[in-house]
Amino acid sequence: MKKVVVAMSGGVDSAVAAYLLVQAGYDVLGITMQIWQSEDPDVVASQGGCCGMTAAEDARFVCHQLGIPHYVLNFRDVFKRDVIDYFAQEYRAGKTPNPCIACNRYVKWQSLLERAMELEADFIATGHYSQISRHEATGRLTIQAADNAKDQSYALYNLTQEQLARTLFPIGTMPKDEVRRIAAQMIGLRVAHKPDSQEICFIPDDNHVRFLREYFGEELAAGDFVDEVGRVLGRHKGIGAYTIGQRKGLGMAFGRPMYVKEIDTATGNVVLADDAALFVRDMIVDDVNFMAISLGAQAGERSSPLRCFGKIRYSHKAAPCVIRYGDGIITCSFDEPQRAITPGQAAVFYDAAGRIICGGTIV
């Protein structure tokens, strides 16, 4: 009997994933990752998402209902180093990080998989809405976008071939309403109608400026709002408070809609412009991970152009583009200009079948 460690967040998705694995005859073990940083029980209990004490209690109760063991394991150090610290430092550098992608990479897979192997498990499983397939031409494993509104393939682009080979997505192709139906009608789980978490789990009030002030123990360094030719328009409250494409929260009126076009870390200026100025065709992507296809350019060379579909944020509809790889970076040119391409965010490239070719971080 194959043993599976299920990452139990306390939500309905991981609960149904565990249930389906039990039904399929696996030896299932539920693990909740303790990533909260505070020792104050009231603070821990109030944290949202998959971080709080309430989530761990929900996961424990689900495992009890399913008749499987449940453990809470301490991942606080790796979460602090690779998610929270990364998030804060990227914002201070004028970039817009994606902490969920970092958590997937370093916590849910790298660290959890290591623990699972210590427990002699064959696989880890999560409640992500994606599916794993094997590319018929290359033989490599890849993640294929789920054909529903909950597709989460974008946030999983940096899993390695070894990690994919030991990963299961039991609900990967199911619609969310079917998952809730199974939880309510077939299992009777109390988390069947638990709402999805929307905010960053370690910033439950969704105020990242407050978080950055508390993290660094000081106010963010103020600077100037400038237009595209460098004229000063006013003062801003620190480059860490802004992201490309932002309009709300600028703190002052300009007589017309103005958006963040660029964050200049050298001068500390935030460049504002009209919405039309946010649309560009080209971007550079580094820290590349290959899935379905390895373009395999030699050092100093560029691969042949590859037509595909590029996605520049979770909510972005993948758009037709051409990519080349060489010297560790991808150069991408979209067929049509895309709005607010943002340094620090992930760029993920898909083939026509919705399979991930590769992905990386927008420079």
Image (cartoon, rainbow, N blue to C red):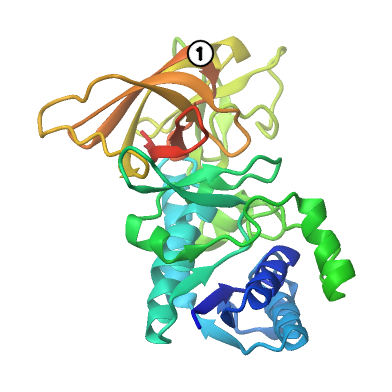
- Say which residue appears at 61% left-offset and 57% top-offset: 128
Question: Is residue 81 visible to us here?
Answer: yes
Classify 295 as above or below 283.
Answer: below
Residue drawn 63% across the image and 44% down it: 151
Of residues 47 and 129, the one drawn nearer to the viewer in this rendering: 129
Please provide percent x and percent y for residue 268.
Answer: 42, 33
Where, quadrant-wise, is the C terminus in this rendering? top left
Q: Nearer the viewer, residue 28 or 33?
A: 28
Residue at position x 48%, y 44% from top? 221
> Is residue 152 or residue 123 the one in the foreground?
123
Q: Callout 1, which amino acid?
A: Pro
Q: Is residue 11 left or right of residue 274?
A: right
Residue 90 in the image, given as x and y percentages of width and height: 43, 47
The residue carrying pointer 1 sits among few (fewer than 14), some (14 to 19) or many (20 or more) residues within 10 Å by Cα, namely: some
Q: Quadrant of residue 264?
A: top left
Helix, strand or loop at mark 1: strand
In the picture provided, is 177 more to the left or to the right than 86?
A: right
Left or right of 138? Residue 200 is right
Residue 115 percent coordinates (x, y): 42, 80
Q: Residue 12: which quarter of the image?
A: bottom right
Number of callouts = 1
Q: Position of residue 261 (x, y in %)?
A: 51, 22
Residue 231, visible in the rendered structure? no
Q: Is residue 146 above or below residue 18?
A: above
Q: Which residue is mark 1?
A: 337
Q: Nearer the viewer, residue 173 or 48?
A: 173
